[in-house]
Amino acid sequence: MICEKIGMKVAVIGVGHWGIKHVDEYIQLGYNVMIWDKSKEKIKNCKERFDTVEVKNLETILNDKEITCVSICTPNHTHYDVANKCLMAKKHVFLEKPIATNIDDADKLIELSKKNNVILQVGHIYRFNNSVKKAKELVNNYELGNIYSVNFSWTNFEPTFDDIGIILDLGIHPVDIIDNIFGGNYDNIKSRGWGFRQKNTEFAIINYRLITSENQSIFVNIELSWLNPIRKREMVVIGSKKTLQVDCVNQKIFLIDNISKNKKEIPITPNNTIRDELEYFINSSEKNQSISLPYPNGSIAKHILEIVLNAEIENFDKR
């Protein structure tokens, strides 16, 4: 749904690789977009791509009463500081994941959003992915039978990052998908990670036991890599009757019969997940409340952060 308030102001703070996607979607939705970034090069690049954007400093954005909604797409270690300033200014905030780099900061942001009665939505984008939604429907309808395990392969090649390892940055998504589909509690979480080009982890394996609300145990295994040039966002759910293979990038789903090995594609319509989550954010802010699930609010984001932070690297190898 295109926003009815054509010309309404929104701000995007941080216009690097991901922030520029926010700018693009907001412009296509009919908004006047204000931008700010510490990097003059990133601002220049954004202006060259989108000549309608207006460059403002952070203080101007915070003081502009016409700007009610802000997307924060800055580096992970800056999330708390920038979000805190925006929430203090009573802006509705869309904050790219993770909500923070520690639980204390997450708690402070959640409390501040409640105190100032504004939306705090965190960018757990796969809650809006149609292939993940369909997977959840098939699991809930018992198409797979009892679930034994869920396996993720989440890989792509990235340059080195000084401020964060792969578990906190990339591991957020598989853990959030598990929570979205199954809920429940986690137990016996373990991980191992390696760094080849930097001090932080670039490749990691996480596994844990998920205990569902029906007291069913599911084994979870997650492979993360910034070294593999083959970009994959794949989930395989193994059940007692059937196995589900989900390609979250191309939004394709295949259902495999465990006995006959017959494999069939389940038709779904791929969606623009970033647009859908931003529209959801704007619509929620206009009502000043979440409009429906799968609203990834601060409390959900904090819960996912807790799981990821508990995936402590037991045997970190720097090659």
Image (cartoon, helix red, strand yellow):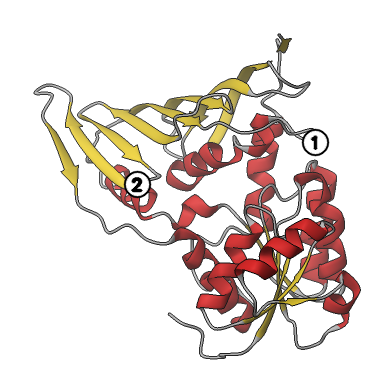
Instruction: Give the residue number, with chain letter if any, for mark 1.
Output: 163
Question: Can you tell which mark lies on residue 250?
Answer: 2
Picture coordinates of residue 200, whole percent (x, y): 75, 24
CA distance for labels 2 and 1: 30 Å
Closer to the camera in the image, 34 or 142: 34
Q: Is residue 276 above or below residue 312?
A: below
Residue type at numbered disc 2 = Asn
Q: Position of residue 57 (x, y in %)?
A: 87, 72
Kindly identify the residue that appears in the image at 56 percent across and 26 percent down. 225
Query: Picture coordinates of residue 126 (x, y %)?
Result: 48, 50
Picture quarter containing residue 270?
bottom left
Category of crowding for the residue at label 2, using alpha-carbon neighbours closer than 10 angstroms: few (below 14), some (14–19), many (at least 20)? few
Q: Secondary structure at mark 2?
A: loop
**Along the viewing direction, whichever of 185 and 7 lies nearer the viewer:** 7
Compared to 120, does 106 lie above or below? above
- Residue at the spot 55% in from the left edge and 62% down from the top edge: 295
Residue lying at 66% horizontally and 38% vertically, measured from the top left: 169
